[in-house]
Amino acid sequence: MPFCPNCSTEFVDGTDTCSDCDVALVADRPVRKQDDEGSHAKTDFVVLRSYATRMEAEMIVETLANEGITGLIKSNEAFGMGTGLGVMAPTRIQVWVSQDDLQVAGDLADSTIDPV
Ligand SMILES: [Zn+2]
C-alpha cells in the first residue's frame, strides 16, 4: 500500500497524493523496526560502579530507575554450574548505565551505597 513519506499515513491502492500533506505517496513502507534497533544500538553503556552483592546493585538500579535512568546489572557470578556456595571466585556485581547518564548516575549511586 502507498504511504506518505512525510506523515507515514497509509493509503489505499490507487491513491497517489497525501490528503494532509499534499505530497506524492511512495510505494515502500518506512522500516521503523530497523530505525528503533539502530538508535538502541547507538546507546553506549558503560560500567558505573561495582558492588559486592547483587542486593546492592539492585538497590542502585532501583534508585536510578526512580530518576528515570536505566541501569543494567552484569556480574561474574557463575549460574547453573552446580558448584554450590563458597567455592566461586569473589563476585563483583557491575551496574552499567548509558554514557549519557554516567555523571548523574554516579552521584546517585555514591549517595546510596559506597562503591567497592
Ligand atoms: Zn502525509
Image (spheres, rainbow, N blue to C red):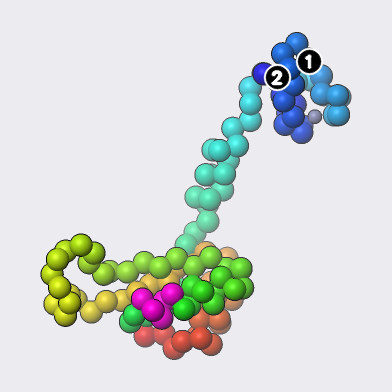
- Given residues 107 and 12, the one toward you in this image is 12
> Compared to 75, does 24 lie above or below?
above
Residue at point 14% right, 77% down?
Answer: 87
Write down the quadrant of residue 49 in the picture. bottom left
Considering the numbered disc 1 on the image, is that residue within a helix, a strand or a loop?
A: loop
Horizontal side, residue 34 vs residue 2: left or right: left
Mark 1 and mark 2 in contact? Answer it, CB < 8 Å: yes
Residue span colored magenta:
54-58
Residue 23 pos. (x, y %): 82, 24
Horizontal side, residue 93 vs residue 6: left or right: left
Nearest to N terminus: mark 1 or mark 2: 2
Residue at point 16% right, 64% down?
Answer: 81
Considering the numbered disc 2 on the image, is that residue within a helix, a strand or a loop?
A: loop
Q: Which residue is mark 1?
A: 16
Q: Which mark is residue 2?
A: 2
Residue 107 pos. (x, y %): 56, 82
Amino acid type, callout 2: Pro
Dominant SS of magenta comes to: helix
Residue 72 pos. (x, y %): 45, 65
Residue at point 58% right, 40% down?
Answer: 35
Which of the image's four quarters has the C terminus?
Answer: bottom left
